[in-house]
Amino acid sequence: MLRRQRQIRAQIQKLTDAGLFALSFWLAHLVRSHWELKIFGGSPDIEPFEQHAWLLLAIIPVAPFLLDLQGFYNRPLIASRQRSAWQLCKACVLAVIVVISVMFLRKQLLARSVIILFPIVSFLLVMLKEELFRWWMETKVGQAQFKKRLILVGAPEDTVRLQCQLKKTSGDGIEVLAQLDLNETSVEQLVELLHKHSANGVILTGKHTYFGQIEKAIQACELEGVEAWLLADFFNTQLSQTTLDDFYGRPMLIFRSAPEESWQGLAKQAMDLIGALALIIALAPLFLMVTVLIKLTSPGPVLFRQQRSGLNGRPFTMLKFRSMVSDAEQLKQELAALNEMSGPVFKLSDDPRITPIGRFLRRFSIDELPQLINVLRGEMSLVGPRPLPVDEVMRFDDFAHRRRLSVRPGLTCLWQVSGRNNVTDFKDWVRLDLEYIDNWSLWLDFKILLRTIPVVVLGTGAK
């Protein structure tokens, strides 16, 4: 896996493991104190934890350091249980030796029961964390968050060798979707594979491939908003930021026209999860009331489900409170001539399909609230370009518009808080979405969320 991704993952693990070792020391002392546990004899009394809390200053930095010495953070994403347990066991033993040494140098005593319980509890907690992460990675949500879905592009002699290397590291969450030889096929076929498989990365090997074809492939990925990992020389790009990394020790150029993986990106995912969960709990009474109103005023289901294009164009089922008549999709063709939006998107201000209660729900964006469930599933974000129906995305006449699919779609976006009722040109809509992608930061998300509040409260959103 790329060095930057490995470093971020290792830093998160180190912080987590340091906290678990500290918690284990406290739990070992707690068990000894409350149950008067004695091992190899000793007094039933024990000093309060506060007298030994200073040891945490040694445990917290030393524990991840010892794990790192054992190669614990250089493992694949899904590592062998036996290998993980052995490395962890050695680190726990060394941690106890450090604690005993520090106590000896300070000429202080610590209950033998605590010394013996500490490595046992540490081992169990860290292994529990490993099992929870393994379980998470086996779920659809976990795979969507971590798995790299790649297409290998290059001459067969290059891609076959690379795929053999990737098979040896299958635990790193890498899935090879397809292989393509640009010397024999066109770049258009690569674009078709990206659309078909919803890939989020392309590896290009340039040793035996025409450089002109590689440049076209990178530019296609650039327009798609898909990362291109190049094992080759430099090429000119129009939008992408070029960074140098290494891929299992081999130099790699990355051409990226979407936000890269970073601490801000992880914070955004945490904000999505916590924010969506908190809003669902807080708005539960409103969900119930809207459900009753829709049932009483209009025949049909409460929720409207539609296939929308998500990250990298991957389809997902978006949820909304139904605000139109139940056969709205069938009537859409009859109203196509009245479309007020240029391009592939359909928009009609006074849409006759909207029910009376639906008009109220739309005015205050209440119909969008079920998409908080999509956020919890990892299919959407609180802030991001609004997801479009799959059939509308298929009708894009400019592939550059697909770059808006390079980030997760959101509940609110720059377009919605920038006078969206006045935007009738689809190109202006895309321009605002790409402006958001090119200037993304966590602070920008906060500003958009804050600007969304008056838009919703005053009902100045889409009618």
Image (tube, rainbow, N blue to C red):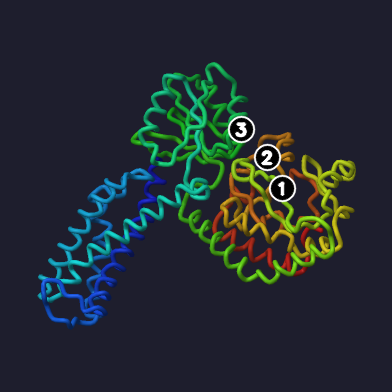
| SS at circle 2 | helix
Residue type pointed to by label 2: His
**Mark 1 or mark 2, which is nearer the start of the sequence?**
1
359 vs 207, left or right, is right
Q: How far apart are marks 1 and 3 (CA)?
A: 19 Å
Q: Residues within 10 Å of mark 1 (few under 14, many from 20)?
A: some
Residue named by callout 3? 196
- Residue placed farthest to the top in the image? 184
Residue 294 % position (x, y): 79, 63
Residue type pointed to by label 3: Lys
Residue 455 higher or lower than 183, as above or below = below
Residue 192 higher or lower than 71, as above or below = above
Q: Which of marks 2 and 3 is in front?
A: 3
Q: Which is more toward the observer, 251 or 31?
A: 31
Q: Which mark is residue 401?
A: 2
Identity of the residue drawn at 12% across and 76% down: 108
Residue named by callout 1? 306
Assess whether mark 1 and mark 2 are in contact (beta carbons under 8 angstroms).
no
Q: How far apart are marks 2 and 1 (CA)?
A: 21 Å
Residue 387 higher or lower than 21, as above or below = above
Residue 212 sits in quarter: top right
| SS at circle 1 | strand
Q: Which is more toward the observer, 10 or 322?
A: 322
Q: Residue 53 carries which label?
A: none
Identity of the residue drawn at 22% across and 80% down: 51
Q: Which is more toward the observer, 23 or 392?
A: 23
